[in-house]
Amino acid sequence: MEDKRNEITLFCHFCGCELTAESVCEFDGVQMCRDCLYDRTTVCDCCGDRIWNEDDYGDENICLCESCRDENYTRCDHCDTLLSNDDAYYDDDDVPYCRECYHNHCTGSIHDYSYKPEPIFYGDSSRFFGVELEIDGGGKDKDNADTILDAVNGSSELIYIKSDGSLNEGLEIVTHPMSLDFHKNKMPWIAVADEALRLDYLSHKTSTCGLHIHVNRTTFGQTREAQDDCVSRVLYFVEHHWEELLKFSRRTEYQMNRWAARYGYKDSPREVMDNAKKRGIGRYACVNLTNYETIEFRMFRGTLKINTIIATLELVNIICDMAVKFNDDEISKLSWTDFVLSIPESEYPELIQYLKERRLYVNEPIEDESEEV
């Protein structure tokens, strides 16, 4: 007869259920049932070791033992998000941040080049212009960026600032989309120029800076086909009047080839568009077609002269107007003389003055009243 006097009855340390030799689980010197083991412990996703739930140093997405947390992870100093060491950004004092907090709090107001906030539209129009103005020489300095933003934005976000690898020690000032009227009458371009110059930035007097203007594609039509039809006339105008626009741009041929290459002259707008699509220049084209929502005029050299900024916006607006209103035959027959004589001086005084200064108006050259900066 089997002697059971020396058998010991086992019970779960937590729930008290009776355990058999087959059902008992032991962890960290504690005997328990399988259900309590799974309820009260977990497994480190990094090393695979089992740990008590209260010793889990991970978050809702990952379980971590203390050792793996210390060796491979850290937390954002601002929002406390758990980060792998590979995903952490560090400031000058070696303090870790997540990507968003680093760019929002550590670089001041200088966002990275790929930064694209939700656009804020200013002005009552179906056509909006987003300006990218590069300035250089004063440093990629967050205090300078904050100073410019404070002087321009006030209680609204009119501009934001990005870094740009093509600049030596500079910043890229970007406006939200604005109507031409808003740019001319409400956008504080004077504050932009004054603060930039005061902080020792230049734009025209550098070899690096451009003035780029984005225009919303919907101003050319609601379908992609209608838009491409109008944009083809924009491209044709640029190619047909390349020499005049080169002079207008204040760039050299070398600078154009590097930052705003032409697609090449063809006999009709449609042929220019077809050639542009085939060549695949990318975004470093005179008119960049790679963005889905906008086309980007990249021809123009940077400037901190207000008249030049406004004149450039006015020129782009008129080119867009013609692309919408004229057909292919009309745009192909338009000479530069006909073009400049068609510009209403009362509506576009800055453009007329600039054309005269650059000897691009008809028989009416005037001296430049102020130096480009």
Image (spheres, rainbow, N blue to C red):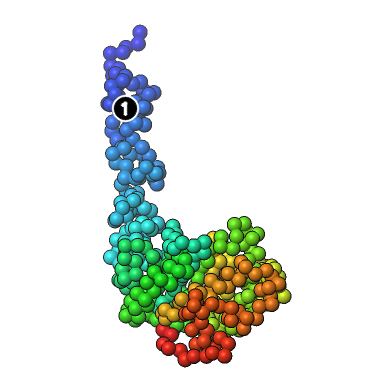
**Residue 259 image offset from top left, x and y in percent:** 54, 76
Q: Is residue 121 above or below residue 52?
A: below
Residue pictured at 37% horizontal, 63% vertical: 157
Q: Which of 261/365 is in front? A: 365
Name the quadrant of the C terminus: bottom left
Q: Quadrant of residue 171?
A: bottom left
The three-letter amino acid code for the residue at tag 1 is Met
**Residue 233 image offset from top left, x and y in percent:** 64, 70
- Please give the count of numbered marks on the rendered protein: 1
Q: Quadrant of residue 372?
A: bottom left
Residue pictured at 59% horizontal, 78% vertical: 342
**Residue 52 image offset from top left, x and y in percent:** 31, 37
Q: Looking at the image, which residue sits at the far top?
A: 1
Q: Looking at the image, which residue sits at the far right?
A: 267
Count residues near mark 1 (Cα–Cα under 10 Å), then give few for <14, some for 14-19, many for 20+.
Answer: many
Q: Quadrant of residue 283?
A: bottom right
Compared across the picture, whether 328 is left or right of 297 comes to right
Residue pictured at 31% horizontal, 68% vertical: 150
Residue pictured at 56% horizontal, 62% vertical: 219
**Residue 212 image offset from top left, x and y in percent:** 49, 72
Residue under label 1: 32
Q: Which of 85/280 is in front? A: 280
Can residue 114 be seen here? no
Name the quadrant of the N terminus: top left
Q: Which of 308/167 is in front? A: 308
Can residue 240 be seen here? yes
Q: Which of 353/300 is in front? A: 353
SS for dot 1: strand
